[in-house]
Image: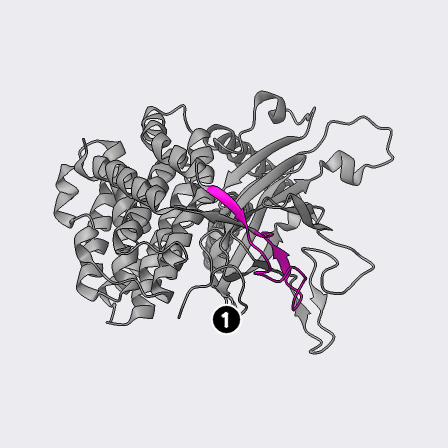
Amino acid sequence: MNSLLKILGTFIIVLLTVSITSCNQNGKSDDEDIFDDKDDIGFITEVESQTYYLIPSPEGLFSFIRDGDLKYVKDVLNPTENMDKYIDTRAKELNFGIYSADLAYVASFNKYQESVDYLNTVRTLSDEIGISAVFDENLIGRIDNIIDNQDSLLKVTSDSYFSIVRYLESSNRTKTLALIVTGGWIESIFVVTNLIDNFDPNSDAVQLLADQKLVIENLMSYLDQNKSDDNIQRTINDLKNLQKIYQELKTEVKENSAPQENTDGKIVVGGNAKIIMTKEQFEELKQEVAKVRNKITKNN
Amino acid sequence: MKQFVKNYDTMNHFKGSVNQIKTKNNIQMKLLKFKFILLLILIPAGILAQDLDCPSRLKMRRATPPYKFNSLSKSAQCLTGKKYEFVVPLNAGRDYRISFYASPVFNNNINFRIIDMNTGQKVMDLPGEVIEYDKKGSCVLKPYTDPASGKSIHPYFDFYPTSSTQLKIIIDIPSIKQSENEGSNFNAPEERRKGCVTVFIQDKKSAESGGFSVSE
């Protein structure tokens, strides 16, 4: 009986210790869902809110290209040899995003050797920014055994990207994630603008670029949540002209172009508004994206 | 006398054996207790550790063909008494399927609202669970029985953007005091519970025309 009491006592002490440790870890490390002192003692005076701004992955953006008829141009990508230029953390994190987008692009076109090269570059950079743990034996095994198959190539590359995002979110490295996401988005837009030879306002690619007006607003709000960090603030400043160009895009109301009623149980959203990009705006955007992107890749 | 000494030796030998067995038993018991304590430590620690890693919850979700996993999916750590907003950009020309999952700690006591930011209209406003209904579209978290197949289906919501837009998903998790102690005059400190809420997004190329669509 005494032994049982002792065991129970030990259990309660251990449980309390584990619970307290767990709460402390959260309170300290979770920047977003932060517990302030008031919350720690369990009182809530008003309803708090928190906003997550979601940004599509490069693979998500390139899936449009894959479905469409844009061609493969390797020259627009950031050469893997440039990796040695990136010394400081900001350059490494932004270019990690750039290379992740390049990897998604080459994988979208089923370029096996290029995919392996970019995957290795991403792996090397991941080591330098302290996220090499993402590339565990399982993932490395999958990478080593990639066959020349678009689905598995794409699957492995997108799984690698999501593993990185999950790892950074789980370890609350939101600032690193913000820079990686920014680099990935910039490179995706840079690649798409460089694949458009002849401007056609009705083309899918131009519309995809115009619709990024919604994404850049999300991206800027996301970066703004982390602006206390100098590297993020510098990135916000670098993106301001691009944001301005997007803010100037007008919205046009389409006529009779889409069903407005609920079809097949789907909830119809979006209304009739369509974001329009003129040729001049496209050229201006292309120039500005190249400026921002090259500043990152050249590490000026 | 000799017989007595012999018996005495035998008894001593017997006592020694009994002591050895007792010691052995004691060690085994201690080992058993240690294993028991270790289990008691590891099980709750494991449970607590799992609760904290919300982003990994997404790994549990599988896209249902022809839909594919969309990278905008998000699993976030949430607290009772707090409101969360997810701003999701959607592209015209694609069909989106959105479903939600929440940790059992919330007892499905979560309210979901979705605003189409292009039009400013509220396109969904549902609770996590409605006890008296068991049909599609009545709630967000509690599975319903499909009348055709008789299978239990986790609720999902299909969206078709005629133009690219943003959805603002508002997830409101009432505080425990509001939700469980309603009507109580007792002014007790509120308990704050923590868990994960997942916004799982899938998409596919839309078969419908309207807006722009991507050529195959």
Q: Where residue A1 appears, x then y in whole percent?
A: 67, 44
Seen in the picture, residue A48 relative to A66 is either above or below; the reply is above
Question: Seen from this angle, which residue lies furthest top?
Answer: A37
Chain for numbered disc 1: B
From this view, report whether residue A208 is shown above or below residue A95.
below
Q: Is residue B19 visible?
A: no
Which picture quadrant has residue A3?
top right
Position of residue B211 relative to residue A293, above or below, is below
- Image location of residue B12, percent across then percent down: 47, 53
Could you say where residue A118 lies in the image, as x and y percent from the top left? 21, 54
Q: Where the C terminus of chain A falls, by quadrant? A: top left
Q: Which residues are magenta?
A: A250-272
Q: In the image, B37: left or right of A59? A: right
For disc 1, the marked residue is: B65
**Relative depth, front residue between A157 and A141:** A157
Q: Residue at x 44, y 45 (%)?
A: A55
Residue A256 in magenta?
Answer: yes
- Judging depth in this view, the residue of B54 and A216 nearest the camera is A216
